[in-house]
Amino acid sequence: MPFANHKTTVPVVVDEEKCIADKGCRVCIDVCPLDVLMIDEVTGKAHMRYDECWYCMPCEKDCPTDAVTVNIPYLIS
Amino acid sequence: MKVSEIKTVELDVLVIGGGTGGPLAAVTAKEQNPELDVMLLEKANVKRSGAISMGMDGLNNAIIPGRATPEQYVKEITTANDGIVHQKAVLAYAERSYDMIRKLDEWGVHFQKDQTGDYDVKKVHHMGTYVLPMPEGHNVKKILYRRLRRNRVKVENRYQATRLLKDRDGKIAGAFAVNTRTSEPLLVRAKAVIMATGAAGRLGLPTSGYLYGTYENPTNVGDGHAMAYHAGADLANLECFQINPLLKDYNGPACAYVTGPLGGYTANADGERFIECDYWSGQMMLEFYRELEGGKGPVYLKVNHLAEETIQEIETVLHTNERPSRGRFHAGRGTNYREHMLEMHISEVGFCSGHSASGVWINEHGETTVSGLYAAGDMGSVPHSYMLGAFVYGQICGESAARYVNDWKDAPLDEDLVAEELERVMAPLLTEDGIPPEQMEYKVRRLVNDYLQPPKVTKKMEIGLSRILQVREDLAKLQARDAHELMRALEVHSIVDCAEMAARASLGRKESRWGLYHYSVDYPERDDSNWFCHSRLFKDADGNMCTGKRPVEPYVIPLDDDELAAYQSMRIEDTEAAE
């Protein structure tokens, strides 16, 4: 069956001004249990690629520059 | 790719799962014999993995000398679990509980102490006093990580174990794993394997409809339950589902263990108590369900009668430890603990011995029914064992595995298993025009909700089973476009396995037991003459999923009739009379 492009909001937001992933930081990506954060190939910053979030917060708590905010997923909020 | 091209490592002990029990198992094996080659394989990253990735706010089953005894605790769990317990395994936990607390204390885990420096345990259970708060429990994972490093445990993160390997003698011989970021396979040859993969938490679908909004950390899919099953190990009491009283939609614990000792309680819509005891048991959940269904709901956690100082203490504990996004959830909804009662609901179903009794069968040595295979924590069958039980059984398994590898004898690997597994694992990457993992997962979990959730009805469960088997036929159509989707696709295999197990186990036990956990409409009574036994679920020699019975071994701590009935009257009498 062909695929549709299914749009969904993602709960984790990364402040690109503060994010230092382009300088090699991988903290949020390393600690995410669901492995849903990745590097954006265009900006070099971290972003949430998959809407598979437990709103558990290691990414936010462990970020060295306070760049990450975990929101409650829309279906739950 | 050919089998001969797969990267292979050889070890003494492989531990699968780096959350709670896994690190203890790995560290213990190294403490027993520092020469052993021990590897910890983790699907996420051991720094932040498993049920306690963000920490934990307390021990729910601490047996502290002077406040409780192992014998009392064994009695409490025996009655809370309606008599179906392997008491020796509960006793082995209870006898080690205090030493484990001391060990964790030495490692730097902070437990609440009173003015005289004694552990400040609280009463939450029906009979005994076992709850020890950890108001600074957010550092548990960091402490475990330091211990792994200090004991030189090899850690491999982002590897998903997919099947256990066996040798020609039928002993465990390691595991097949896949890197979740590159989809490269890895063959781990090990003399002993300890599984600590947590609950099967992505089985039912949360009422929010959000696949990952589960009570359990959604990494805990039931991979371990599926692997143990395919390796020929017995699973036990799977129909004793995990069903928890949670904050509605948020799906985190409400959490009566934290608020109870401070004066909070579970209430109905009128703000009245209706259950004697907030300790999570099937009997309590049945009363919760009846209140919801009986027009007296919603059910709430009530703390708005407490003093400001107490509420601040509750907020600090609940918003900084186990599920710290909870404060954000309440802020978004505009609920304030001072003014409002907090709406609760019943969680999706799952397998989790931490709170109920369902899991891979283990004895008091952590041994499964397969030689060389051990299981600890939420996936093992020791009931109501919580975080401290995972630590203790991690330790027990680490000791048992270290002993076992001493007398281990080599035998050739069953190569057919490896070839078969390589093909199964890589198939979703080769499929074109297939079904995305998310869709198949939603479908099978929705079927679990529709047909298997208590109250359990035989006809419905039969339909559910046949529909689940139809989804099983679809597994060959799973399509993954990258390594991440491959991980999800392989998880769907585990979920389908667990869904079938949940259906067959529930159809097997023809009585009602454990309150709501196995509340059967067709067999509403408890039937001790036919069903005072563990249930078994296993794969027979022809590859069929079968159920059976395992006798309950004679108790080592006998209970009198009053003690045996202690959890049978959870409802507060006045409320019942008023109905």
Image (tube, coloured by chain):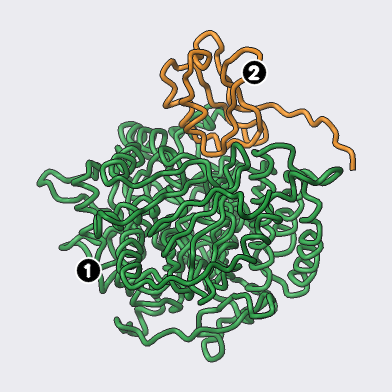
Chain colours: A orange, B green
Q: Nearer the viewer, residue B567 or B407?
A: B407
Q: Nearer the viewer, residue A4 or B419?
A: B419
Above or below, B226 relative to B208: below
* Residue B385 relative to residue B480: left or right: left
Say which residue label 2 marks.
A41
Q: Nearer the viewer, residue B311 or B328?
A: B328
* Res B85 seen here: yes
Q: How many marks?
A: 2
- Judged from this view, the residue extending furthest toward the top is A17
Residue B69 is tagged as 1
Mark 1 nearby-residue class (10 Å; few <14, some 14–19, many ≥20)? some
Q: Find numbered disc 2 in the image and state the secondary structure of the residue it sits on.
A: loop
Chain identity of mark 1? B
Closer to the camera: disc 1 or disc 2? 2
Give coordinates of residue B121: x percent, y percent: 24, 53
Give coordinates of residue A38: x percent, y percent: 59, 26
* Residue B132 relative to residue B387: left or right: left
| C-alpha gap between disc 1 and disc 2 | 58 Å
Q: Residue at x 56, y 89 (%)?
A: B530
* Residue B255 relative to residue B211: left or right: left
* Res B574 seen here: no
The kind of residue on which mark 1 rests is: Thr
- Judged from this view, the residue extending furthest toward the bottom is B529
The kind of residue on which mark 2 rests is: Glu
Q: Find numbered disc 1 in the image and state the secondary structure of the residue it sits on.
A: loop
Mark 2 nearby-residue class (10 Å; few <14, some 14–19, many ≥20)? few
Give coordinates of residue B135: x percent, y percent: 30, 39
Q: Are marks 1 and 2 on the same chain?
A: no
Q: Residue at x 48, y 68 (%)?
A: B172
Q: Residue at x 44, y 84 (%)?
A: B552
